[in-house]
Amino acid sequence: MDEIKQMSEDVLKVAKNLGASAAEAELSLSIGQNVSVRMHEVENIEYNRDKGMSVTVYFGQQKGHASTSDLSSQALKDTVAAACNIAKYTAKDEFCGLADANLMATDIQDLDLHYPWDISVDEAIEIAKECEAAALQVDARITNSEGASVSTGTGFFAYGNSHGFIGGYPSSRHGISCSVIAESDANMQRDYWYSTARAKEDLQTAAEIGRIAGERTVRRLDARKIKTCQVPVLFEAPLASGLISSLVSAISGGNLYRKSSFLLDSLGKQVASPLLNIYEDPYIKKGLASSPFDNEGVATTARQLVKDGVLQGYVLSSYSARKLGLKTTGNAGGNHNLMVQSGAYDFAGLLKEMGTGLLVTELLGQGVNMVTGDYSRGAAGFWVENGVIVHAVEEITIAGNLADMLKTIVAIGNDVLTQGSKQVGSILIERMTVACE
């Protein structure tokens, strides 16, 4: 860790000696292993050992950037020289430059992000086989497998800039996943499940992941089409995070200053149902998106992003903030652990609350226009009547407008999943158009 921090400092010194008025550098090292099996046989064993350095230099309002995977002393010097040379040929941009010095993180907490998993290839193979076997045992109609995998990875990185900021920390991320195929009357369906965490102890067990993957696959058999209609739509928790991602994208600096967002000038305004409350917390121990500072060294802060459906803040880097005449929110590189407040309903309760409508468990294609908010996605899931799942459905399209969808959220479940940077339960939308393809 100290070594790569020192390398960052050395890179910044080279940039200064070459005449750069400001500079920033990031160095990273990562190692990992991924093992996959399919139909009880080992399919892939992969190792990765990556390293890299990227440097950005500023000559006044001119910017140059270069990167390398060679961390030898001479290669680092050559890369800085290349960035300086590039800067001389770029146009001036009054908004570029380092984040303000007074915003740099000074209290860098240990967020408990580093839990190496000392697992041999043979042990990983056994776990993957156990996971796949659990899925195949769920039902005789599961006839094939796309495989199960066990991955583990650790990394170290350091970021520094010419304000005198140097910070970095180690981190880890591990995962287990499984995907299987079921068949019935010439109809085939696939589904999957996975778990990811900083520490192996926080992963779901291999048997549990396999069982869930198998159950999710079998329930999709004998899917039917439905008639075009307008009904309530329930986005299952793994997909509900996508709705939150679309909201975050719409309030992110790049889309705002380019005026390519359906939520322009929405600060302090009602953008969603009063049920929607989103809190950003960068300081969750073991959090998958926790960090004491962002990609510019700016101290991260816990804050309310949406309160009772009213937008409390944007998601900005220093560059996008300057373009908008605002202040960075410490989100260079993305958001940090968005926590969506749950309601009283569990998943079964949400189905009952919906009554008759569509439960969506898979989305296909992009189909989201960030400028207008128009939303149209291919989908699959289940038709629900009187709060009970009746049959699987496929080859349908769901359509609406994100602005309307967010404002017509009628329930948010407490079936929260922790599989990424957003933690949210299933979301029930009052009404959308469901059409057969």
Image (spheres, helix red, strand yellow):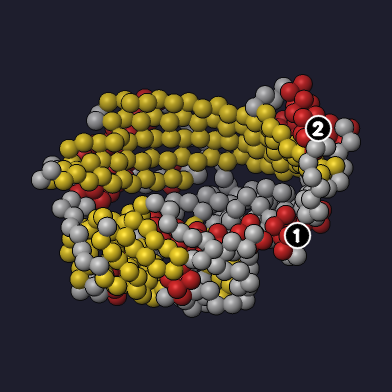
Q: Is residue 50 left or right of residue 10?
A: left
- Amino acid type at circle 2 is Asn
Please report the residue visible at 18 percent of the width from the left and 55 percent of the height from the top: 223
| Res. 381 visible in picture | no
Q: Which residue is the extreme one toward the left?
A: 185
Q: Which mark is nearer the camera, 2 or 1?
A: 2
Q: Which residue is mark 2?
A: 85
Q: Which residue is mark 1?
A: 322
Q: Mark 2 or mark 1: which comes first in sequence?
A: 2
| Inter-mark Cα distance, 2 to 1 | 26 Å
Q: Is residue 96 left or right of residue 239?
A: right
- Label 2 environment density (alpha carbons within 10 Å; few <14, some 14–19, many ≥20): some
Q: Secondary structure at mark 2?
A: helix
Quadrant of the image containing the N terminus = top right
Q: Secondary structure at mark 1?
A: helix
- Amino acid type at circle 1 is Arg
In this picture, is 139 found above or below 402? above
| Res. 354 visible in picture | yes
